[in-house]
Amino acid sequence: MWAGSAASVLLLHGYLSAVVYQPSFAKAASTDQLVPSFAEPIQNVTVAAGREIVLPCVVDNLGSYRVAWIHTDKHTLLTLHDRVITRNTRYSISHNSYRTWWLTIKDVEESDRGEFMCQINTSPMMSQSGYLDVVVPPKIDEENTSSDTDVREGGDVSLRCSATGSPTPKIKWRREDQKDIPAGLKVVSEMHGEHLNISKVSRLHMGAYLCIASNGVQPSVSKRIMLNVNFAPMIWIPNQLVGAPLDTEVVLNCGLESHPKSVTYWTREGGIMILSNSKYNSMLIDSGTYKSKMNLRIRDLKPEDYGAYTCVAKNSLGETEGTIKLYEIPRPTSTSSPAPQYTSKMSKTDGAQQTTSEKMLISTWKNSLVKDENDSARKAELSTELLEKESTVGGIAAAAASDHEFRESGGERKESRRRLNKGHSSAPGQIYFTPFMIIGSSLLLLLLLR
């Protein structure tokens, strides 16, 4: 195509290029000149947009022939020998002693993608081609992507995320706080696809969602989309009855859920609004996206401070309230005298423990024994025996049982005392006395002695 004595005209992509060859070039195919050949193939190359790429074309025995680079897909002549033909300043040509011809493209664009041909003007024409693939990192398409969205609780919502890039980016969704996404009857950590569809939205869906676009070309990109779920305020009260003594301070608490944010305040009986001052301090403490706590601190309680307190919350979707009853309780004292039946005062005697109630029964028993004037010998013996048994748990019951046997059977007392002196024996048939049996035996003894 390029050989001959006349001019050859090339019309490539609207650009007219005239290439004039001298008559001597027509003799290039003489037997004295070697035929050019390509020493190496042109490799297919992939490059990220914005980078620089160099395409080599290696020719042996070029002689007086010329080399041209052509963008085949665009039908555009880029360079002819050592001249740049295209007006695109990002393209340049260089060579190494007319053997290796380097086509350099700076700041590669997606439009540069396609087939590049290295051509020699022999007859017939010689050429080889390589493919340049341009990959583009993902980019969020803002015009076709959702922004922060508000939806009424119980409704449906669809969030969209669109991205460009080459290859085509893949989209996935996840929550910014790493929580699972409720999806029907199940929960998932992430969802895939351009659209995130949620039916019957609840306040549990509220939060920031990340749409992440990736296509294997770094870096991946993401967009943060806030999903706001609107609902009327709801109040719950941990303690509806709160007791506090006079001259102290107390904090009343109401839990609140609402979105958008509610106007909150406290009232007393009769609807009188409470304002923060030296007596009262009203606080609203946020504890989440839609959760908060309403606290009312009341200082230096007086009798007139007791009664009902109401926490109130209002937003554009509704109003609610809750009531707490504050009542007086006695001030706790540092020392108290508990009822005798719930308290045991313990004292140690010879390593054993004895209760106050046991001592009282011993004293009563001693007094009854003294009144028995007809049995002075028995009185002395029992008193001695009682004092010996007094320091042992169950001693009262043992002495009471011994005295009863003495009165009933007389001569069998020695055998009874022998059994009692064994204490808490593990021998078969041994009887153990409970506190109730001890008290019962003592009362029976008192009746017998009168």
Image (tube, rainbow, N blue to C red):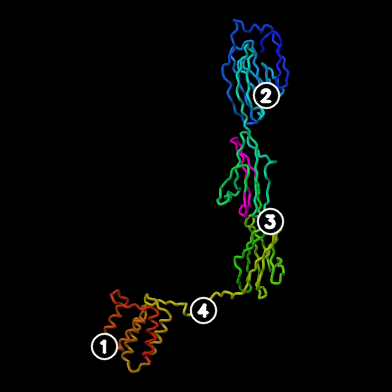
Describe the element under mark 4 as helix, strand or loop.
loop
Give coordinates of residue 42: x percent, y percent: 59, 21
Percent across and percent down for residue 101 are: 62, 18
Q: Nearer the viewer, mark 2 or mark 4?
A: 2
Closest to the camera, between mark 4 and mark 3, is 3
Q: Which mark is residue 74?
A: 2
Q: Amino acid at mark 2?
A: Lys
Q: Is residue 221 magenta?
A: yes
**Disc 3 residue type (three-letter):** Pro
- Local secondary structure at mark 1: loop
The local crowd at label 4, few if under 14, some if 14 to 19, many if 20 or more residues have their Cα within 10 Å, is few
**Amino acid carrying mark 1 in the image:** Gly
The extreme bottom residue here reads 374
Q: Which residue is mark 4?
A: 337
Residue type marked 4: Ser
**Label 2: few (<14), some or many (≥20) within 10 Å?**
some
Distance CA(mark 2)–CA(mark 4): 105 Å
Mark earlier in primary sequence (3, 2)? 2
Which residue, given by chain and number where applicable, does mark 3 sit on?
Answer: 260
- Residue 383 percent coordinates (x, y): 34, 86
State the image coordinates of residue 175 (x, y, percent, origin top left).
Answer: 60, 48
Q: Earlier in the sequence, mark 4 or mark 3?
A: 3
In terms of sequence position, does the residue under pointer 1 or pointer 4 come before the other? 4
Dots 4, 3 in contact, CB < 8 A: no
Q: What mark, if any, has residue 411 been given in the picture?
A: 1
Instruction: Tell whether 45 sits left or right of 350.
Output: right
The range drawn in magenta is 198-223
Label 2: state its secondary structure. loop
Q: Please report contact status of discs 3 and 1: CB closer than 8 Å, yes or no.
A: no
- The residues tagged by marks 3 and 2 sit, at their Cα atoms, a distance apart of 57 Å
